[in-house]
Image (cartoon, grey):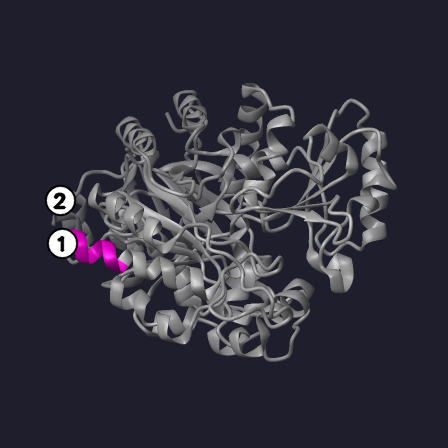
Amino acid sequence: MLLSLSLTVSAADAKSASPAADIIVVNARIYTLDGRQAWAEALAIRGSQILAVGTREQITAMQDPHTKVIDAGGRLVLPGFVDSHIHMLEGAMNEQWMVIDYTSTLPQLQAQLKAYAAAHPEKKWILGRGWSYPMFGAAALPHKKYLDEVVSDRPVYLEGFDGHTWWANSKALQVARITRQTPDPAGGLIGRDPKTREPNGVIKEDAADDLIEPVIPSPSREERLSALRLSLKEANRVGLVRVHCASNLLERESDWDNADLYDQLRRSGELTVRMYMAYYMSPPTLTDKNLSEIESGRRRYHDEWISLGAVKFFADGVIESHTAALLAPYSDDPTQSGQLLWTPAEYTKAVTELDRRGFQVFTHAIGDRAIRMALDGYEAAQKTNHTSDARHRVEHIETVSAVDIPRFGQLGVIASFQPLHAYPDADTLKVWSRNVGPERTQRAWAWHSIESHGGRLAFGSDWPVVTMNPWVGVQNALTRQTTDGQPPGGFVPQERISLEDAIKAYTLGAAFAGHRDKTEGSLEPGKVADLIVVSQDLFKIQPAEIGKTEVLLTMVGGKVVYQSPIFEPKSVATEAHP
C-alpha cells in the first residue's frame, strides 16, 4: 500500500517515505497496462521489482547517490513481451540447419540444396526447414524425386514451415526402412504413389515423422546448450522476457524433457528469459506413467524462472495437408474432413483428470471440429471437478464454428493465437483459403470476434514456424496485410484488433494465460521489473510501420539483458542475472 500511496504525496514526502531505488527510468513515455494509471513518465526499480511508477518528480525523489539512472530519451517503454507459444529448443537446433525461404520456388530450393550439400560434405544428414505448400503448385505437396535429382548419396529431410509435413529423399526413406509395406502410424500418414503404393517422400504429422527421427544423429548436450544461448540472446534482442514452450513430440527437442539444460544456464547466469514449459501428452490415452512424469516435473521446477505446469495435446493437424479436423468436408476435396488425433471420450477423460490435479492444458486445435472437441472437453472437466479459473487454452484456432466463438468467454478458455499465421501470403490465400472455402474463411483467425464475445487473447509466434520477432506479429494483428499492403483492405479485415489489444495480448494477456498476471505483464508497483525500450512510438506511427520496430533495451528482473548499440542512455545496469 505504501508504494501506491507514495505516488499521491509530494516529492519531498515520497523521498522520506520510500526506500531508495536501485534504478530509475526517466524521460520516458511509459505505457503501463495498469488500468488505474495507463501512462507514466518514469518508474523506479528496487531489486528485481518495480518500486513505483509516476511522474519524473515523484520518481527522482527516490534517487540516492547509488541509484543508476536510465534516460529513455523520450522513447516508448512497454512491459517486456511474452511469446505464448514457442518451441525454443527445436527452434534453436533448427538454426543449425539449412534455412529455406518459404517464398522460394522449387528451382531455387534445388539450387540452395546443391550449394548447401557441396559446402557441408561432413554432414551425414542434410536437414532443413521452411518450404511452403505453394511451391508445388496445385498439388501443394512435395515429391522425393525433386530431392533425388540434387542429392541421392545421403539422406535429405526437410521440414515444412508449419512443422506438420516433412519431405524426404529416397535415401532418407531407405535409412528409415520406410517401404510400401510400412503401415501408416496412428495419427500420421506416409505419402504414396497412388498406383504402386511406393512412398513418395511426403511425411504427414508427428506420428509419421517419428519413423524417421530416431535414425537421425542426435546433437550433443553442448551443441544444444550452444544453440540455446544464441536463441535466448535473440529472444532478448526482440524484446521477449518470457516464453511458453508448447512441447514437442521428440524428447530430444522438447523443452520439458530438457529442462535441465535451462537449469544449467540459470546456474551459470545465462538464463535471461523466463520459461514456462508444457509436457507432450501423446494419444490415445492418459497413463499412470504420464501422470508420474508430469507430477515429477512440476515438483522439480515451479519457480518464476523455470516452471513445468502445463500439458500439451494435439487434437488435429493442419489445413494445408488436410489433416486438420473439420466439421464439414474440405472445400477443395470433399472426400476429406481431416482427423482427430484423440477420441473425444479419451480426450475428455484425460483433460478432466489433469484439471482435477491442477494442471493447465494447452490443446493444438486448428480445425473447427478439433476446436469444438477441446471446448467440450474443458466444459466437461469444469462441470465434473467444479473448478474455476483453470485458464485452459486452445492453440491456433484457425477456423472456428460461429456457435463456438462465444464459448471461449463463457468457459474462461484462453484463445492462444499467433498473429503472423494469418499473414496473407500465397499459402494463406491460395492453399489455406481454397481448402476451407469462402464460408469458413470468413472466420479465419477470429481474434476480434472471440475477444468481443468476452474471450481472452494471448499472442505468440510458434517459432520456428515463423520468426520469434513479435513486432511483425503486432503489425499483422492491426492490418492483416502483407508488408506491401495486400490485399487491399486486409484479409478478413473484420477480425483486426486495436494496437492496445495487440500489445495486451503479448503482455498482460499472455501473463494471464500463464497464471502470472499478479506478478508480470504490466508495469506497476510490486511486479517484476521486466520492460523494454523501443525505437519508435507505436501510438504515433502508421500500423504498416510497426514491423520495423527495434528494441533498444530489454530488462528482465531489474537486469539489463540486451542493449542496442544505437541506444546510449545516461546509465545502464548491465549485470547478468545471478
Question: Closer to the N terminus: mark 2 or mark 1?
Answer: 1
Q: Are marks 2 and 1 in contact (CB under 8 Å)?
A: yes
Provide the residue span drawn in magenta.
379-385
165 or 539, nearer to the observer: 165
* Quadrant position of residue 217: top right
572, 232: nearer the viewer = 232
Identity of the residue drawn at 84% across and 40% down? 148
State the residue position of label 1: 5
What residue type is disc 2 on? Ala
**x 58%, y 20%: residue:** 220
From where the camera sits, is residue 287 visible?
yes
Q: Is residue 564 visible?
A: no
Count up the numbered dots. Answer: 2
Q: CA distance from mark 2 to mark 1?
A: 10 Å
Q: Position of residue 338 (x, y in %)?
A: 53, 60
Residue 17 numbered tag: 2
Label the magenta part by its dominant secondary structure.
Answer: helix
Q: Along the line of sight, which residue is nearer the eye, 420 or 177?
A: 177
